[in-house]
Amino acid sequence: MSAAGAKTPLVLDIDGWTHDGRGVGRVAGKAVFVGGALPGERVRARIVRRHARFDEAETIELLRIAPERATPRCPHFGRCGGCALQHLESRAQLAAHAERLADTLRRIGGRHPAHWRDPVAGPAFGYRARARLAVAPARRGEAPRLGFRRDASHAVEPLDECPILVPELARLIAPLGTLVGGLRAARELREILLAAGEPGVALAAAWSPAAAAADREALQDWGQREGVAIRHGVAGTGATLWPDGAPALAYAAGVDGPAIAFQPWHFTQANRAVNRALIGAVLEELAPAPGERVLDLFCGLGNFSLPLAARGARVTGLEGDPAMVELAGHNARRNGLDGCEFRCADLARDPRGAAWTREEHELVLLDPPRQGAAALIPQLARTHARRIVYVSCDAATLARDAATLCAPGRWRIARAGVFDMFPQTTHFESLVVFERAV
């Protein structure tokens, strides 16, 4: 197509999805990824980028509307990078996630679960209990801007509201933006982390260099007025250095479950309701008898380890971050759980020779980051455990690891299911249960 032709709107029938929530149409057999379009729709679209194997386009008119289309609740939708699916009804989002997991396991992993768990969802809005806010430097004649990154960009979409945040955090967005706009050295404020506990709210501000006294005082005064605990950190070339010994927030790991302490800069699941459902599913699938040994890989702060120990299991938790290992141990002690042992281990490397590989465990749980657990899977394929439960935030790496684990013929996928941890986005959590094939 000529340069002039590239500017001419196209009429496309949308028959599929991309992994990031765009509709897929075709022109002369070439895929076109169309932002704002849903499967089943006909749209008028404009090409915005060309590639060798596909083109990218934006919707300029809906000619046929899918029955699952919804009116986005947030005025920033389409510019803010936080949400991708507010234009799709919530039940259809859940169905799309389940379809994507099944397709990915089949296409990449070549596997079919023997049974599917019912998909699990929580509130569609007002669920997110933590947020990472970016600060855009002031332009000439403008105040600094506070918001989320725009999709595939370093630019910041200024926010006055955010309907996916829990109410305790959502109410802070506008006043916090006003506060940041008045700081003397806002250009040195790299990011703000907000987190809600059960109860309590904390804010962590990352500065480079350290916060000026006047700005530190302004934030502390604002926090006192709003009921928000304030932490200040210094952002370096690597990780931000956060204060030691700051009072922590906490959340309940399951109904009447252990209380897990954390700071705003620690990884925790953002959706507390769905996290509790996921913990319940892990307990149900592992079903440890009292005294049985469970290996929890990528254990973090003890999100799964502590509820398992509360059921009477003896849990060994492995985690790569020493600070997280220390806090996991603290969480076990504060809950009176002596059946947990936490160790630091580099789980991104080949584990041959590591002490834990010489220990026997009846059950194994792993909850790796988005990169998956490729280095561990050959070792787990040889384990004498009777069941492995894999919790994943990335269907593609899960399917890759499942293919490797099942390839020798010793393991099969017994059950799988999706947990809608991040409504209005294309992300979701998966749970896959592996049992011995022979």
Image (cartoon, helix red, strand yellow):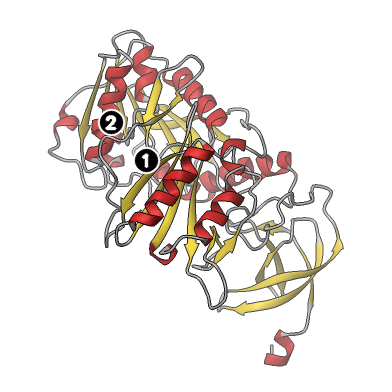
* Residue 27 appears in the figure: yes
Residue 266: mark = 1
- Local packing at callout 2 (Cα closer than 10 Å; few below 14, some 14-19, many 20+) is some
Residue sitting at x 30%, y 53%? 240
Q: Which image quadrant: the C terminus?
A: top left
Quarter-of-image position of residue 172: top right
Quarter-of-image position of residue 402: top left
Residue sitting at x 32%, y 61%? 208
Disc 2 marks which amino acid? Leu
Residue, far top:
290
The foreground one among 219 and 78 is 219
Residue 360: mark = none
Look at mark 2 in the image and give the residue it sits on.
327
Q: Which image quadrant: the N terminus?
A: bottom right
Q: Is mark 2 on a helix, strand or loop?
A: helix
**Between discs 1 and 2, the one toward the N terminus:** 1
Q: Position of residue 427 (x, y in %)?
A: 55, 47
